[in-house]
Amino acid sequence: MAEVIHIKTNPEVLKWARDSLVLSKPKAAESTLISISRLEQLENGEKYPSMDELKSMAKTYNRTVATLLLQKPPKEKPLPKDRRTIDSAKLDIFHEKTIMAVRKARALVSSLIELKEEAGLPIQPFQFRANIEESPVAISHKLRIEWELDEFRQLENVNDALDAYIEHVESLGVAVFQLSLTQDNLRGFSIIDEQMPVISIKRGGEQPTAKIFTLFHELGHILLNEGGICDINFDPNAKQIEKWCNAFAAELLVPSAQLLKMNLVRQYVSKNEKNWAKKDLVELANHFHVGPLAILRCLLENNLTTSAFYKEKHDAWSKPTFGISKTPEGRNIPKETIKERGRTYISLAFKAFDQNKIDLKDLSDFLGVKLSYIPKTRQLLNA
């Protein structure tokens, strides 16, 4: 029987790798198939791990074996601030999948910057700023005109509108990714301490209208230079910064002046009717590429519905199952790849490959897909 070779490691690095995912020892033991007592020995420096144990820990902690062999724990940037509207006891406590999503967003923006540099493209700085003391309505009115967002209203297909909004935000100097955010009731997050600010929105399950609102809510955070991890709802008890970003996104997408001119709104006003039918809210929402709750919030701000009616619908429509796509698609790896990283990122990766600046293995790494999926990804990109 071959002798098991144990590899000298710094126990502080092993402990850091586990703690960085906020994994308890029992959870780590369950995932790595290494007993708790053995993990304690490794993290206390009493024993050294075998290569199989290192590989198991690397897989569980989403680190490379080389990282676990470092002489000391590396310094990592902190998680974005917790902006969620949840019980205070749960604030700043995240599932490991959320932590890995933030890590992935940081890795993707680094890759995007590398691809831009390979293409000889400048890293455009995001030049817009706002202060939380300023009116979000006034800021959104100014920027909607400057960014010519009314033109996007002509797009009838909401998926086309989402793609167009994302490309526009990217053109402002922001990296936008759609990631799998399955834990902590997240809708999105924003990062401001990278070379490019980053917005990540939830990829699967939600309606495109919800993603559009999340996109501009997170853009509000970047305007304020206050990134965060958000659940995004219209809870009146939300933090001030969340209320500001909600108001900014709402007015940017649903200008009050335009909403009040809609024939459907005028009909309700003429009847002094403040209880709105869902189908009418949906009709207005479709026009502005938002969800019905965003419309109802705008109506409340303009005294066209009651707080009681709004609260009733908010409580019903803020449930996790409301607004989830009724026809979720099966796995389509090339489509997921383009959604996740964005057409700009994918196009730059293929351009670098076509110009022989990266090889096929590099292209696979940049796209995050196996070699067999590359032709289909290019075909879908060019469709």
Image (spheres, grey):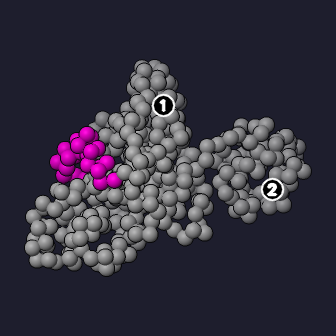
Q: Is residue 250 left or right of residue 124?
A: left
User: Looking at the image, is 59 positioned above or below residue 84?
Assistant: above
Does the segment drawn in magenta span residue 360? Answer: no
Element type where label 1 sits in the image: helix
Spot occupied by residue 110 in the image (x, y as percentages of width and height): 52, 35
Q: Count residues near mark 2 (Cα–Cα under 10 Å), then give few for <14, some for 14-19, many for 20+.
A: many
Splitting the image into 4 quarters, where does residue 377 fall? top left
Q: Is residue 39 left or right of residue 374?
A: right
Given residues 146 and 341, the one toward you in this image is 146
Spot occupied by residue 196 in the image (x, y as percentages of width and height): 47, 36
- From this viewpoint, is residue 32 visible? yes
Residue ID for mark 2: 39
In 3D space, how far apart are the residues under numbered discs 2 and 1 (Cα atoms)? 38 Å
Given residues 263 and 112, the one toward you in this image is 263
- Which residue is situated farthest in the right direction here? 46
Do the numbered discs 2 and 1 sit on residues whose CB atoms are within 8 Å? no
The residue drawn where x is 82% and y is 42% is: 9
The residue drawn where x is 76% and y is 45% is: 13
Spot occupied by residue 71 in the image (x, y as percentages of width and height): 79, 37
Residue 113 is labelled as 1
User: Looking at the image, is 91 positioned above or below residue 139?
Assistant: below
Label 2 sits on what residue type? Answer: Leu
Dominant SS type (magenta)? helix
The residue drawn where x is 27% and y is 45% is: 142
Magenta span: 135-160
Label 1 sits on what residue type? Answer: Ile
